[in-house]
Image: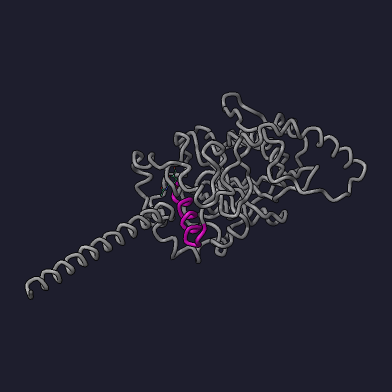
Amino acid sequence: MAGGDSSVKFLLLHRTCKLVVLLCFLHISVTVFFYVRSLDVRFSFVQNQQHSNVSSTQTNQVRHTGFTSGTEPKVVLTTKEEHREEPKVSEQPKEEKKKKEEVEPEKKLEKCPETSPLLVGPLRVEFTSPVNLDQIKDQNPNLQPGGRFRPRDCEAVMKVAIIIPFRKREEHLKFWLFYLHPILQRQQLDYGVYVINQDGDQIFNRAKLLNVGYLEALKDYDYECFVFSDVDLIPMDDHNTYKCFSQPRHLSVSMDKFGFRLPYNQYFGGVSSMSKEQYLKINGFPNNYWGWGGEDDDIFNRLSSKGMSISRPSGDVGKCRMIHHDRDKKNDPNPQRFDRIAHTRDTMHKDGINSLSYQVVKTERLDLFTKVTVDVGKP
Ligand SMILES: *[C@@H]1O[C@H](CO)[C@@H](O)[C@H](O)[C@H]1NC(C)=O
């Protein structure tokens, strides 16, 4: 009897143990599952991704549409299908509006639609035949001095300053103006183009020039949104709107140079946009990245450390071409860049728009853009 009793107890104990082990296992599996999932979604700092720039095999596996859909579904997709028919449809009412405006010119304009009806979708972009400034000027008769524009039939959804860091890339700038002015006008933006030209022959400082562009553009007009664009990048679809979104936007998401995909998930170089608030929240950009590389990763780290995420167009809409060129003089890779991006969190509050110093050498209001030549100093 006593033996039977203890064997029943043992059986019970055995079963209980099994159950506990099973529960533990279940618990661990669930934990691991959610952890792995959160890794996917969460932004990791770029410092952990330095190898991205060294080993291309690894980075090529990163799909460019990776995390847009998760973070910001609303922003993500302006599919071509939605708008393909619209340009034709819109022509009629546009004509009518124009007439009305001539009768009562001072009437307050209606807001432009969220998606411009003038967009045409994919564009052919090539750099074989050179373009010249007079031709571009003739083709864009509605531009105001300094490369300014606002739609005449409606009130633009946003006032956008486009900032281009620049030095000795006249040929590229012509292509940029040739392609972008018509696109930006079709996007119905209230915009101005600011070419920030680094004076002298010191080492190039892209991020500092962008900071200068931010301040100089604000002296002109009450801009709400800033698009930071390299001079050699041309979008291949006008649905890639050069404006700001509820999160900082990366616009050049599939460049021909990288096989029309993101080189790595945290990549924020090329063309990006930020509202005034987003920009100020991260204290602008670093001023101490001299030479090529890393400053865009630093900007990404700033955004991510302030809890912001990156909004992106789809890989299709975000296609763009880069104009081929040799490496610029005085813009060699910055050997300190890896060390710098490892410390963004510690340095970003001291180094940024709050510590920016520069001298404007000259501001020229040209037909197609405003050119600010600036002395940003040296390392
Ligand atoms: C890595 O490469 C990208 C793409 O060329 C570049 O924009 C970025 O600045 C580079 N980062 C570093 C740390 O070199």
Q: How is the image coloured?
A: one colour
Residue 185 against residue 211 in the figure, above or below: above
Give residue 320's position: percent from left, percent from top: 54, 36
Res 282 visible: yes
In this rendering, the count of numbered labels is 0
Q: Nearer the viewer, residue 99 or 29?
A: 29
Give residue 63's position: percent from left, percent from top: 43, 41
In the figure, is residue 139 to the left or right of 99? left
Give residue 83's position: percent from left, percent from top: 66, 36
Which residue: 82% across, 48% down? Answer: 109
Q: Nearer the viewer, residue 232 or 238?
A: 238
Which residue: 46% across, 41% down? Answer: 64
Which residue: 78% across, 45% down? Answer: 154
Q: Residue furthest top?
A: 129
Q: Residue furthest bottom?
A: 2
Residue 125 against residue 204 in the figure, above or below: above
Which residue: 72% across, 54% down? Answer: 221
In the figure, is residue 51 to the left or right of 129? left
Res 379 visible: no
Q: Nearer the viewer, residue 107 or 9?
A: 9
Residue 22 against residue 326 in the figure, above or below: below
Q: Check residue 24 for magenta coloring.
A: no
Is the stretch drawn in magenta largely helix, strand or loop?
A: helix
What is the quadrant of residue 1 in the picture? Answer: bottom left
In the figure, is residue 127 to the left or right of 155? left
Give residue 264's position: percent from left, percent from top: 42, 45
Q: Check residue 296 for magenta coloring.
A: yes
Magenta residues, start to end? 292-308
